[in-house]
Image (cartoon, helix red, strand yellow):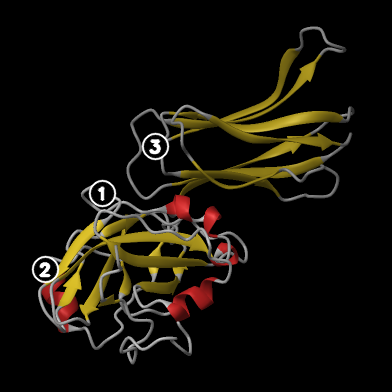
Amino acid sequence: MSTPDILIRASLTDNGDLPRTGDVSDSPDVIPYQTLVDDPISFFISNYDENVNEHLKASVDNFIYVRGKNLAATLQQGDIYLYYALDSQLDTPAKWTKNALQSKLGNYYVRVSAQSQDNIVVTEDPFVWNPPVPGEGDTYSLIGILVAKGTKPDFSKVTDFEKYVDDNNNIGWTKVIIDKPVPPPIPGRRWKTTFAYVQGATARQMNFSLQCNAIPTGSYVSFFADNNVGPDPAIFLDKTKISDPNGSYGIASQVPAGYAGNVSFEFLYDGTPPVDSSITFVASYLEGSGNGPKKTIVVASVKTAN
């Protein structure tokens, strides 16, 4: 069964002539889009002469539309498939053909039909992709291909992906930019408590922790000492987001004998915490030797209630 004579352009000036030349990695017809379009057929036909590709957002659903133009004088029908791939793997399709994307309705292809020459087809049911946060140096592409209805794409003989795109006008290749999610702002400080900590005459492996009681999830806690000379690591917990309202958050540190410093702990939250909620800073160590049971010895406990 022959491939439908529907062009998926490699560029805005692509009229279907083969081989295609120039940069073929920015197809205006494989269209990454952050939001759903109410009437994608009308919208993407109206801007057919434009490249309206958008950046994608990592870790959320994005929508990818594919369009094409009938080059024949007769009815042309076909199925459009869409894949994502690491750019470093494009020449090895076996690594990315498993990355077929599903449409919003849950299908692995979208069927299109063009009645006559120059008719433009658009995937009314968009493909959906929730992109990962790119790793260091990782870049991604989207690959849309149109095949005869009822058939599946076959990339088994492809060893030079760019040449394959040059030689076939039923495929579109778009390198995408994936924006990392912007973390929400850290809330302001609600309170800070400072107290004097003295290690005493014995060096020990100490555990410093903030023990929460009904502290809202999404708030933050931290602690720090004004004297960082001696403890390894320093007595410091960077701003830490609360995931368990009654959880404990802290570090272990080897503290030398005679260490002294002022330790501050703080609670960051813009809302109103529950009545009677509290945070307790606890400094403790385990007493015992060998593999036997050990007893927790608390040497400092300072509580601040909201």
Residue 170, percent across and down? 34, 73
Labelled pair 1, 3 in contact (Cβ < 8 Å): no
Task: Give the spatial CA distance, label 2 vs label 1.
Answer: 19 Å
Q: Amino acid at mark 2?
A: Asp
Label 1 belongs to which residue?
107
Labelled pair 2, 3 in contact (Cβ < 8 Å): no
Which residue occupies the foreground of this view, 270 or 139?
A: 139
**Which quadrant is the C terminus positioned in?**
top left
Q: Amino acid at mark 1?
A: Asn
Ranked by sequence position, the earlier of labels 2 and 3 is 2
Q: Nearer the viewer, mark 2 or mark 3?
A: 2
| Occupied quadrant, residue 123 | bottom left
Q: Is residue 236 left or right of residue 37?
A: right
Label 2 belongs to which residue?
39
Q: Is residue 100 left or right of residue 282?
A: left
Residue 304, percent across and down? 50, 34
Residue 281, percent across and down? 60, 32
| Mark sitting on residue 216 | 3
